[in-house]
Amino acid sequence: MRVEAVQGDITEQAVDVVVNAANGTLLGGGGVDGAIHTAAGPGLLAACHELRDSRYPDGLPVGHAVATAAFDLPARWVIHTVGPNWNTGERDPGMLTACYLSALAVAVDLGARTIAFPAISAGAYGWDVDEAAQLAVGALRSWQSGTFQDRDADGTPHGIVLARFVLFSPRVLGAFERALAA
């Protein structure tokens, strides 16, 4: 799996999966969540209402992931995951790592080969950008090394071939580039 970091708009990524840094309600919000809901159009909100009605009446828990269609986005699917909110005391690094691993597992179940991630919890949820980047890259490296990734009978990893961090600012991109270089 190739892992890269770019500065850009996650809603413009032509990948199989775009990961949404959602809030627990799944009904849109600010930042990446708001941008994805706006770009995907009203079908995404309707799909999220359906998820709330059928599977998550109390909201999506932190670290879990669930997929919907991508509607008007160039991606095929949106995988929603709720990152831990540092500002409310959710400071366990394992919770943030779980967001990435859960999203990867859902993506593989969908048959996805390419995935774009935002910097989960590194915006309004208040995680230190450098720590968030290190945890994100560490999660993908664990997956890549086969700790979490399925393998074919001959030992060859299958599933995701490209994981791209799509970051909104030069400062956040720099943190992810440093984490990838380490």
Image (cartoon, helix red, strand yellow):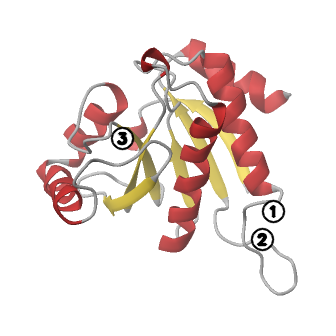
Mark 2 secondary-structure assignment: loop
Q: Residues within 10 Å of mark 2 (few under 14, many from 20)?
A: some
Residue at 64% in and 63% down: 160
Sequence-wise, the earlier of marks 1 and 2 is 1
Residue 182 image point, x, y percent = 86, 28
Q: Which residue position is annotated with label 3? A: 11
Residue at 77% in and 32% down: 180
Residue 89 image point, x, y percent = 49, 20
Q: Amino acid at mark 1?
A: Gly
- Check residue 157 in the rendering and tell me which mark sits there, or answer none: 2
Instruction: State if disc 3 and disc 2 touch (CB < 8 Å).
Output: no
Sequence-wise, the earlier of marks 3 and 1 is 3
- Quote the CA–CA distance across marks 3 and 1: 29 Å
Instruction: State if disc 2 and disc 1 touch (CB < 8 Å).
Output: yes
Image vertical order of residue 22 relative to residue 50, above or below? above
Mark 3 secondary-structure assignment: helix
Q: For this view, does 76 lie left or right of residue 29?
A: right
Inspect this view and state whether residue 111 appears: no
Q: Amino acid at mark 3?
A: Thr
Sequence-wise, the earlier of marks 2 and 3 is 3
Q: Residues within 10 Å of mark 3 (few under 14, many from 20)?
A: many
Residue furthest to the bottom in view is 153
Inspect this view and state whether residue 150 appears: yes
Please tell me in which quadrant of the rendered image residue 96 appears: top right
Mark 1 or 2, closer to the camera: 1
Q: Which residue position is annotated with label 1? A: 146
Residue 67 image point, x, y percent = 37, 60
